[in-house]
Structure formats: structure tokens, C-alpha cells
Image (cartoon, grey):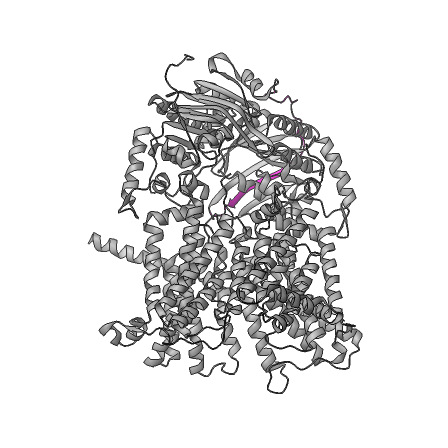
Amino acid sequence: MADDAKHRNVLAAIVYRLRWWLVTGALLVAFTLWTGEFHQAQTTAILASTLRHSTPLVLGALCGMLGERSGVINIGIEGQMLMSAWAGFMVASATGDLLIGVLAGVAVGMLMGAVLAGISVGLRGDQIIAGTVLNIAAIGITSFFFTQGRTLPSGKLLPIRLGPLADLPVAGRVLFSNKPITYLTLLLVPVVWFGLFRTTWGLRTRAVGEHPSAAETVGISVVGMRYLNLILGGGIAGLAGAYLSLEAVGSFERGMTNGKGFVALAVMIFGRWNPIGAWGAALLFGYASAVQTQFQFRDWLTSDPQFVGMIPFVVTIVVLAGFVGRARPPASIGQPYSRE
Amino acid sequence: MSIRSALVPVLAVALAIAVGAVIIALSGSSPVDAYRALIEGSLSDPKSIGRTLEKATPLVMGGLAVAFAFKAGLFNIGGQGQLVVGAIIAGAVGYGISDLPWIIHAPLALLVGALAGAAWGAIPGVLKATRGAHEVITTIMLNFVALNLTDWLASKVWREPGVIVRTPHIEPSAEIPRWGEIPTGFFLAVVAALACWYLLRGTTFGFEIQSVGLNADAARYAGISVRRIFVTTMAISGMLAGLGGAIETNGIVGRYEPGFNAGLGFEGITIALLARTHPLGVIPAAILIGAMQAGGSMMQFKADVQPEITKIIQALILVFVATPIIVRWLLNKREADELSVSSTWGS
Amino acid sequence: MSQVSEATPALEAIGIHKRFGGVVANDDVNLRVEKGRIHALLGENGAGKSTLVNILFGLYRADRGEVRVAGKVVNLGRPRDAIDRGIGMVHQHFQLVPVLTVAENVVLGDEPSRSHTMFDFGAARRAVQELGERYGLEVDPEAVVEDLPVGTQQRVEILRSLYRRADVLILDEPTAVLTPQETDQLLEVLRGLADQGVAIVFITHKLREVLAIADEVTVMRDGRVVGSTTPGETDEAGLAEMMVGRSVVLRVSKTPASPAATVLRVNDLCVDDDRGLRAVNELSLEVRAGEILGVAGVEGNGQRELVEAVTGLRSVVSGIVEMDGHNITGLSPRQISELGMAHIPENREKHGLVGAHSVADNLVLNQYYRAPFARRGFRQMDTVTEHSRSLVADYDIRTPDVFTPARALSGGNKQKTIAAREFSQGARLLVAAQPTRGIDVGSIEFVHQQLIDQRDRGLAVLLISAELDEILSLSDRIGVIYGGRLVVVADASDLDRIRIGRIMTTGFDDTPAT
């Protein structure tokens, strides 16, 4: 009997800690069902759309998180995504191979991460300025070198159905017949969580982000860890870019990231620099974007689509104003590190 | 500001132009032809100078907006949003009111546009002062909101009848005249720069702003209300950007069109940093970038080089100006004047 | 105790020379530390002690000279090299990651792991427990470091070096943050370690400690070694003279106070800290014109919150702060300053000065908006310059001119700048928090003398300090703060070091009343 009591208490503790998430989730599910008029196809469409919109946000948040956890602000995620989307698209349309295109996107993201590290860690330049440089460079380069009219010879990435699971109602369509990068993203979330909190790499990363001189004192190379994390994170942002051009849209347009890199920062903060939290936050934001479809179903605001377009950005501001002041980023953020 | 630290941006620009030449060469064109065409299109005759100053005017205002906010340690990337808000409001006042003498109408339109920009800039300021929300994200988000909002206003509320989405042309009484080829708006921008410079140097308000930017904790301990400074500085910064938009609308374009002067937020940052955040330095920096933009089409026409190369050069300028150690190497200085805005993140 | 040792020294520094920009921090410095001995390194702030040990720990590289461990020359390019050679360091500002646990901090960098990537929490925990038992430094491995009291945090720092089997342990000003009783405990632990063969280097500027524990003393001044001796051969005055180069006034002379009306009254004050925990707990005190009330206590017992509440920088949960009978609770810092309160903050870099502003601007930092320094919002820079020149002269502030940025000044001159500013306001109450922390002896003497002079002119002074000597030397009445409460307030003549120390440590005053 004592064991049951103990298990009940543990469960109660978890429920209590996640109460706000659960309440919000319940409200959103109710809202979805109501607006979808309990119609399965529409509900499924909303949930699938939520997952779609959240994917680049999660990836962007993970990128930002790896950097910030080791003490470096990265506001250049937008630029990284844009360049990777462009690079992935250009390579894929030139070679005809989507996989190579994705790899190119990841590589470009890593390269930009290295540049950010070089400026902010190696040269000790201001981190926000370094990120801004990435953004400006990305806009410039992708516009300059882009030629109109290219297409992907074999179309965009196709969904992979996971056998009989894909035939389940609702969940089958939403969870089990997704495209490759979407699956990869769902895998990355627990992987990054495990890395940060269960491995020595994660322990060192967090130490470097909270108190770099303490880490240096015990022989950890602060500069090395930051380079590593920014490059890894850059790769993840690259994946996000490849997702946009190769999986979601199937082509490249100038400025196609449209602020997602910055929304990803809000997702990261809202998720308190934790992969699981960021995933939940990204789903929330993804829902805010997906809800446009709902509005169309109900003929709300169809003649004023601009207000619907504003929703993700307004939500970001509200989240920031409501939460960020109360959430604590890693302590050494923003300050260049030097040993002497 | 010493001669030596003024040398830094000059060297940075020279280096960026050199690298730009390499890129142009790599893309198959002749750098010499390209740069020659660029200069021809921007500085060779009164007409092209007029074009340069035209382009430079909103850049001065955008750069002032960013530089002014920097003084308080704030990073205002919302210049574009503040600018379009100011632009459309000025345009609305410009066309919506008739039978007003020029002497009242034109300044009124500018004033209301500036105030609209101030309000748009104050929002992130308030959010930072009361909730600690970092202005980098809130200003960028508000950019997108502003673009959507003005888009809607231009297509629904203040729409000129017809197919094109834009506001009607402003009344002649609201127009800001040109002085020969030179847009008068440019002089207004210069006046604004002088006003900012004097404000920061000679007034107690300016002292408070700088104190907050240099050490907000000590400023607080000295009795300065840091929150009040955040809000007022962002409001003034927004006002400068909004005024820039108003001048552009009522002086150059004559109406508000979506897609107006896109990217000004980032260009403002480049200019502010080129000017080492000095209000007077913004003027030559804006003229430089304005020249690059004005000569862009000539460069495309004569040397077959895409004008977007100027954006790459701008990015390079940004890198070379902002990075302390490169600067140190360039000048062999012992202590570079470091630019830092990251210290208020998360606070 | 001063035998000539035939054994190879555990650690030796020979001919160390280090320059930072234009300043020579170490000039031909030699140091010799024997196994199993406690070697004190004495000098005032800025003498070069920290530079030397940072070189020994691989944080800096010497320009010239060599370091030998157990007789062999070593190349110490980074702390890792020193750690691998058996040198451990306990820093003045702890190098611990606040949000991680004790176990995580102790093993960081040499983590026990399964299959090379996964962190073995269990092994780390066990290591901490074993080490704690062996050396008398028990700590809960699962505790989060930032929740621990300062004395316990220091234990974690020591454990970290012991985990890596240090043969030499360097401690940089370890007693700066401890109560007298905790200091005694630490010294016992160090003695135990020395008996087990560890060589100990102990940096301090406290003469009393040197005499209490060291086997040998090396004294540094202005970057050079000026002498080596042992406690048996000298006394406090002798050491002070070696440290400073002239005879030093160890206690400022003062006439008894003649206090007048009450200027500051604090009643049942309750204040929370940044984390929402109660830091000041129903605290009451009074300061009268012409007297110095010294509040002794180890940092972290609510002093900071008390000072911030009184000066208007922090909101008050309940209770009243009154100045000259006016209720000033909840007023803004500016309003309180205008009513006649001056404040010397404990962190001069962060709160006291805007480093990039000139000395002149810093000298008017709290009055820049008032006549004659400004008229209708426009600054009158001529007046500011004149005013600052006269202050620089009166207070002997060493600076090339008044336009030099404040950050270029030495610590002592920075503090003098702040003091000059606060003393020249015509205030009736001064709140001085840690006013002589980290500055040279000359400046300390100056500030102390200023405080006494101002007191004699009728200023009421609330002095908060963790330096017991300072409290005892300056105060007319003394209070001891512990856990946010004033445990005792009495005339200075009724309290002595031992009693105060006990209260600082335990929170109780169990001396029977006479």
C-alpha cells in the first residue's frame, strides 16, 4: 500500500508541475474540436499543420539553445535558416538529389555557426552584432546569387508512412506519415535533452554557460566548447532551412524564413532553454499558425488576412512580455570570454 | 572622438570595398567598371547627387534611430516598422486633409508621422521597462506586425481606388519641396542629427541616457530612473525612424506603397555602427550607403553587376567595423573602443 | 619552527617577472614552499600576490622566470597543466558553477563516466562522500551550490582540489568571507591537510591570521618580495611595516562621540531578496547625528537588502524607515538622496561609478541635474569641471586630470572619488557599505579618517562591514546582524571581538550580562 501511495504522490507532483501545460493543452484540444465541428478531417488537418509549423521552430530553438547554454547569444538563426534553405535548394536542383541538398543545407548552417563563433568567441566581438551580421549577409547573398525559375527536378521530399501505424485515425496521419526531416526533429528533441542533462558534454556545456572561468579552471576549454556548440547548433538550424525549401515548400523564395528564426528565440525562452519545453512551446506557436486554416473554415477574417498573419508575432511578444522577465538564461550569456 | 578612432570606419570601408571587388570579379564582371559606374550613378552630377541624398535621407534617420537607442544600451531593430508606421500616417494626414495652407499641412503631417513612430517605438520600451522583455525580439516582431498592419491600412482603410494597393497621392500642400535637385528632407535629417548630438552632449537628459547605457546599475544607484529612460529613449528612437518614413513619403514618393523601403532596420544598424554610434557620424555614413544604393542601377546597367552586391559590402563593413580585434590589428591600438550591446540580454 | 629544510620544496617560484601593460605586477619574485608546511603570502591589495599565485596555477604566464614542482621545472600554460602537476587552488571568488550540485562541481572536468559519454552520477556522489569523511569536509553531494552558505561553498572548492590529489593547495584570501569561528575551523582543516603532507600557500592581508597559523611568511610589496620571516620572529606591527613600507596607524585615533538627535530610525523592517526569500526580518535600529553605528556580520545575512531598502533601491515588505522624523519608506532613491542621505555602495565598480564617464562626471553623478551643475536641463560643464578639480585636490585623488575615465583609476582612488562625492553633498546621514574593501592601506587610512572627521562634524553614519577590525576601530555603537536580524546592539566598549565573532557565527548572544 505504501508503494501505491508513493507512486501516486510522484504522479501528483508531476501533474502539479506541468499544470499550466496541461490546462493549455486541454483548452486547445477543446477549441480545435469545437471549431472543427468535431469533424475528423478538419481536426486532423489542424494537428498535422501544427506539427508542420512547429518543426522549423523547434529546430531553430534547439540551435539557439545549444549556443546559449554555452553562453553565446545567437540571433542569427534567421540568417542561418535562410542561407541553408537557399543552399539546399540550389544544390538539390543542380544535382537532382534531395539528400545531398539536405546535407548541403546542414553544412551551410554549420559553416555559419563557425563564422558566428569566429566573430564572437574567437575575435570577442559583440554577440548580437555578430548575429546581425549573419542575418544581413544571408539576405544579401541569397538575393544576390539567386536566379529565378529553378525547380526541383524530383519535387520535394515525400512523406514516409510507418506501416500499419499510419492507418490509425487522426494519429496515423499526424504522427506516423510524416516527412523525413519532421521525424528527425521529433528524434532530436529527446536526443538533445539527453545530451544536455545526462552526458559529460552536456555538463561541461552548462558549466561553460553559467560560469566559464570555473570551467576553464578545471581544464575545460571554454572557447572550444563554444565553437563546438555553435557549429552543432548551426547544423540544426541548417536542417531547419533545408526543411523549409526542400520539405515544406519545394522551392526557394527571397526572405522565405519570414521571421521564423526570431520566433524560434521566443520558443527557446518560453521553453526555458530546455529541449522538451521548447518543443511544447513550438507546438503552441505552430498551433497559432495552423489556426489560420481554422479561420478559413469558419470564414473569419478572410477579407482581412493581415490580422491572421500577425498572430504568431503578437503571440511571441505576449510570451516574451509575460515570461522572459521571469525566466533566467545561462549566467554568462552575452559576455565575451577571455582568460587574462 | 579622436582622429585615430575615426580612421577605423574608413579602413573598414576600404577593406570591404576591396573584398567586394574580389566577389565582383569572381562573378564574372570587372570591379573597376562596376565601381566606376557606381560613382557615376551617385556622385557625378547634381541629378545623381540629388538621388544619393534622396536615398541617404531615410538612412540618416534610420541610423540616428539605432544610434540613439544604442546610447542607452538598447538595440532597436524595429526601425523598419517604426518607419512604415510613420510613413503611412504621414501619408494619410497628407491626403486626408484638404484646404490647409502649406505652412501648416506639411509640418503637421511630419509631426503626426513622427509621433506615430514614437508610439510604435515606445511599445518595446515599455515592455522592456516593465517586463524585462528584450527589445531585439520585440522590435523585430513589431516590424512584422507593422508591415501587416500598414498593409491592411493601405489595402482597406486608406486605399486609392484602383488595382494597385496604395494610398492616394498627398495634397500638394503636404508635400515637402525640393531645392533644385536636393531634397529638403535631407536638411531636416541633418538638423535632426545635430539636435540628437546636442541633446546627448549638453543636457541632463542626455547625460542620463548615456549613464544608463554605460552602467545601468550605477545609474540606478545614482537616482536615475532606468525604466523611464528605456521608454523615452525607445520613443525618441521610434520617432526618428517614423520621421524618416514621413519625410520619405511626403517628400519623395508622395504616397504610401507596401514594400516601401524594405530592410531599413538592418541598414540603420550598419550606418549606426559605421558612425560608431556618433549622431554626427551618421551623416557621412548615410551618404556613403546612399551613394551605393543610388549608383546600383547604373552599376547594373553599365557593368552588368547585380545591385545586391552592395548588401554584401554592407555586411562586410559591419563585420570589419564591429569587431574589436580586427580593429586593433588594423590600427595597432592598445585599447579599441569596444561596441557592446549584449550586456542587457536577459535582464 | 624555522629549520633549514634539506628536502626538495614542494613548489618553488624563481625569478618570476610579469608585466601587465605599463604595470609591473611581479618583479623578480622568489617563493619556496615546503611539503607539509603552511606558508603565508602577505601583502596589501595590489602588491602582486594574486598575480603570483595565478602564475603558479597556470592562469597567467610569467614573462620571465621558472616554476618548479618537486624540484622539476614545469611549463604551466593553462590551469589544466597545474592541476595535472598536483597544484590545486581555492579562489577568492569561488570558481564554482552555482546552478550545479556539489558533486557535479567537484568532478567537473574529470568526470567519472560510463562508456565515455554518460555522466556517472553515482560515482561522483560517492567520491564526494569519501573525500569529505577523510579530510573532515563533509558536504551533501546533491545540494545545489548556490543554496549553500559561503563557508560550505569554500569546502566544495577545497574538495575539488583534493579530488584531483593536490600536493600543493593555494588559498587566495580564504577568510575574507568567513566569521571568526569559521576561520578557526578552516585553519584546523588546513593544519590537518598539512600534517598529511600537503603544502599550503595562504594569501592574506590579515596580520592576525598570519601570526596564528603560518609556519613561514613571505611579504610582498609593489610587486617585489620584501622579506621572509616566521611568526616567532615578528609581530603585527612588524609585519605591517614590511607590508606598507612605513609605520602604519593600525587603529585610527578618535575622540569619544557626542551624539545628538536621531537621524535614521528603522522599525521592524522586513525585506525580501531577489529570490523572494525573507532577507531582513523585523530589524530595528537607530543612528544619531555625530555617531557611527557599525553593523558587523558575515556577508549574506541581509546587509545588502537592508542597505538597499534604506536607500530606496529595494521595495520593503513591511516596516518603516524614517529620516529626521519623515517617513521615507518607499521613496525613490533620488528623493531620499535629496532629503539628505548619502550612500557609499559596497560594489564600487558596479554601483558606485560609471567607469566610462570622466572623473568629473562621476563626481556629480548624483547632482548633475541640480543647480549650479545644470540650468533648466542644460548642463553647465564649467561649473562641473571646477567643482571636480577642487574635490580632487581636497581628497587627494590620484588622476591625470578630471577628464580621465574613472575606470582608469586604482581601486583606492575610485573609492576616494565616491567618498568625495558623497561627503560633499551636505548630507545628514551616510550609509557606507564595505567602504574599504580591496583598497590599499593608504587609502584605507584616508577613508577612515574622513569618516571620523565627518562624524565629528555631526554626520550620522551607518557603517556596514565584514571586516571586524574596521568595525571595532571606527564604531561608537556596534550591532551584529545574523539571518536578517540585529542580534545585539551595544556601545563599542561593551563588546569585544570574541563575543561579536560568536554572534556572527551562531546568531546567539549567550554571554551572561554583567
- Please name whichever residue, A264 or A158, is drawn nearer the observer in this view of the structure: A158
The picture places residue A237, in percent across and down from the top left corner, at: 42, 62
Check residue B245 for magenta coloring. Answer: no
Q: Quadrant of residue C213?
A: top left
- Please name whichever residue, B30 or B298, is drawn nearer the observer in this view of the structure: B30
> Which stretch did the figure color magenta?
C249-276
Looking at the image, which residue is at 31% across and 33% down? C131
Relative placement, left or right, of A154 versus C260 is left
Relative placement, left or right, of C203 versus C456 is left
Q: Quadrant of residue B305?
A: bottom right
Q: Quadrant of the N terminus of chain A?
A: bottom left
Residue C281 seen from this side: yes
Q: Quadrant of residue C186?
A: top left
Kindly report the secondary structure that dominates the magenta region of the rendered protein.
loop
Looking at the image, which residue is at 39% across and 27% down? C168
In the image, residue C369 sits, relative to residue C184, either above or below, namely below
The picture places residue B208, in percent across and down from the top left corner, at: 67, 51
The picture places residue A302, in percent across and down from the top left corner, at: 49, 82
In the image, residue C48 sits, relative to residue C283, either above or below, namely above
